[in-house]
Amino acid sequence: MIELIAKSFVMNLFKINCMLSFALLSLTGYAQQIPIDSSTQLNVVEVSDSKYILFSNSSKTETFDSTLLNRYSTNNLADVLVNESQIFIKSYGLGSLATTSFRGAGASHTAVLWNGFNLQSPMNGLIDLSLIPANFMNEAKVQYGGGGAMWGSGAVGGSIHLNNIGIYNRGISFATNTTFGSFSDKQQQAQIEISKKRFISSVKLFNHDAKNDFPFVNSAQYGKPLQRQTNAELQEYGLMQENYFQLNSRQKINTRFWYQFNDRNIPPSMTQNINVSNQKDELYRLTSEWQRTGAKIKSIVRAAYFDEYLFFADSSIDIDSKSRTKVFITEAENNFSITKFDIVNIGLNNTYSEAITEDYIQNPHQNRTSIFASYKIQTYNDSWTAVVSAREEFVENKAIPFSPSIGIRGKFLKYFSIKLSAAKHYRLPTFNDLYWAQGGNPNLKAEEGWSEEASLEHSYSKKNIFWELGATAFNRDINNWIIWLPDEYGIWSPENVLKVWSRGVEYKVKFILEKNKFKFQLSGLYNYVLSTNEKAATANDVSVGKQLIYVPIQNAQGSASIIYKGTSLNYTQLYTGYRYTLSDNSNYLKPYSLANISVSQTFSLSTSKLKIFAQLNNVWQETYQVLAYRAMPLFNYQVGLSLVFNQPNPK
């Protein structure tokens, strides 16, 4: 299958990248007049979301580097976040849709950005995390809390940043990965990279298919019989191609192309006897970026084109739905300093979206323009910083609510730090909300509100010991929350009727002991979240003051890992508390606790590394449901073999 992918796309990739390269080189041709000093040390290519690096340190953040992501190389982004973050992932089952609930917000209230570009669908505002391979990214960052001033629409509960990073002058690298697992799960991955002093080019390929015919306990049927999942087959494959060019000591450009195809059957719920639904997703994502670092100003110009298809079919009810979305994004920003203790960012973003589907009255399009700015000032030793940001967005030349934010970070008593922030956030109505053929409401307002948070952290590091403790309290309100309601004729239509209040606390602890080639790590996470509706949607609305459905009040995670030379062992225990399934809180799902184990052994050779690894999931055979009547697997495993080869450049 990988060979078929390569043959189908290599020529198109070559043409696309050549056109992008020539276009960017023509724009920056004057740069060739400045010779490159061959003795200059070229460092890691800067990631595209520079605003995150410079202006997000007053909010709670988490970073998952390449070492951690490598442990999840055969998993998707949803698996990473379930095991490593404090985000609740709403999963419909193995190989099925997975979305976020960020601090009690909805699935469309999380902005997912790939190298600075928002991936949220203009049709429904969602991004399916199960369709994002973890091995396609070098780094993932999570920013908690509202980020409308920096990231625009959708950054209400938080934002997830996926980055690709290139490192110059590493030589020729090749990696391959093969895994086998429960329920006929098979995966193959390959990556090749050529890294020179001023040029990097890489290709990543993957193929994945599984039957997902796992046994489960059907609690919806009499006697709770043990059944086997049906209509859950999955096949997906894709590639990512990246190019980085160092034009001279001041300028660089990059291009990235991401293609992926997913074909999956949608399994029945526990209350259905059979389901024959099938969904196919196909996407093309192309981005390019130019950076120039001058003596006083750093300029970045980036552009993206996303073309995505969705085909849904269900022969039992005669549905054959096809849709296509196209998104064009252009953005420019400049960073400069007024004094040696501050930095300013000013930028402009334009996003054009359109959808083609028979489910709408017409094929809609939307043009959005945003002006954004940030200012950070710090003390001479960087012990205290303050950040102010703002964004004004225009949708079809109509201004939406102005979105400011402010944050403060400070260090005191040597080992303690504090973070305080407040931010305005918003989410624009989706195309489904506005233009659905039966029930769309073109008069909807944007959801909006404020979020505040305060964090206290303590960290200590001495010789071979490190520990970190942290506590965060947050508060958030969302006005004009969009909800679909039926009218007197039984037609469902969206309205701006709810007001949602979310508040809670989050704790984290981490301990690391390192000595010689031995490393021991303990970590723990705990969340307590109340997210309630504060406004009646109808005359007899019983949801007022009640917890939102599928928002766990409590969840926790604890893990322990040991690394010695080439051996690695990790144990993770996950706890998810009660989740209400009805808006009046009269029904709920019981808490569950899952245990996962991963183990690997790496053998180092002269120019290569061989790794044997295994993942054991739900090792204690917990019977559970993340969503009501959606079956989840009992014990399952995955074993694999990977090989990494590197040939350094000649000195």
Image: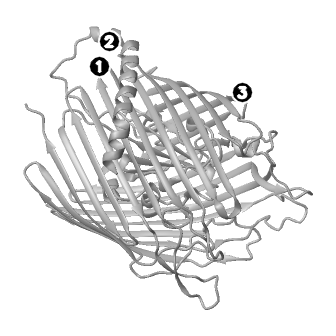
Q: Which residue is mark 3?
A: 396
Residue at image point 28% right, 33% down:
201
Q: Tag 3, which secondary structure?
A: loop
Q: Which residue is mark 1?
A: 247
Q: Tag 2, which secondary structure?
A: helix
**Label 2 environment density (alpha carbons within 10 Å; few <14, some 14–19, many ≥20):** some
Q: Nearer the viewer, residue 154 or 171?
A: 171
Q: Which residue is mark 2?
A: 31
Q: In the drawing, what numbered circle is on residue 291?
A: none
Picture quarter containing residue 446? top right
Q: Nearer the viewer, residue 383 or 451?
A: 451
Residue at image point 34% right, 11% down:
29
Amino acid type indicated by mark 1:
Leu
| 37 left or right of 524 in image | left
| Residue 556 can be seen in this image | yes
**Residue 402's spot in the image, x, y percent?**
69, 33
**Residue 235's spot in the image, x, y percent?**
44, 57
Q: Tag 1, which secondary structure?
A: loop
Amino acid type indicated by mark 3:
Glu
Residues at discs 1 and 2 in contact (Cβ within 8 Å)? yes
Specify the quadrant that holds the C terminus: top left
Residue at image point 64% right, 66% down:
550
Amino acid type indicated by mark 2:
Ala
Distance between mark 3 and mark 2 Cα atoms: 37 Å
Residues at discs 1 and 3 in contact (Cβ within 8 Å)? no
Q: Nearer the viewer, residue 222 or 64?
A: 222
Please tell me whether residue 581 is drawn above or below residue 1 in the rendered image: below
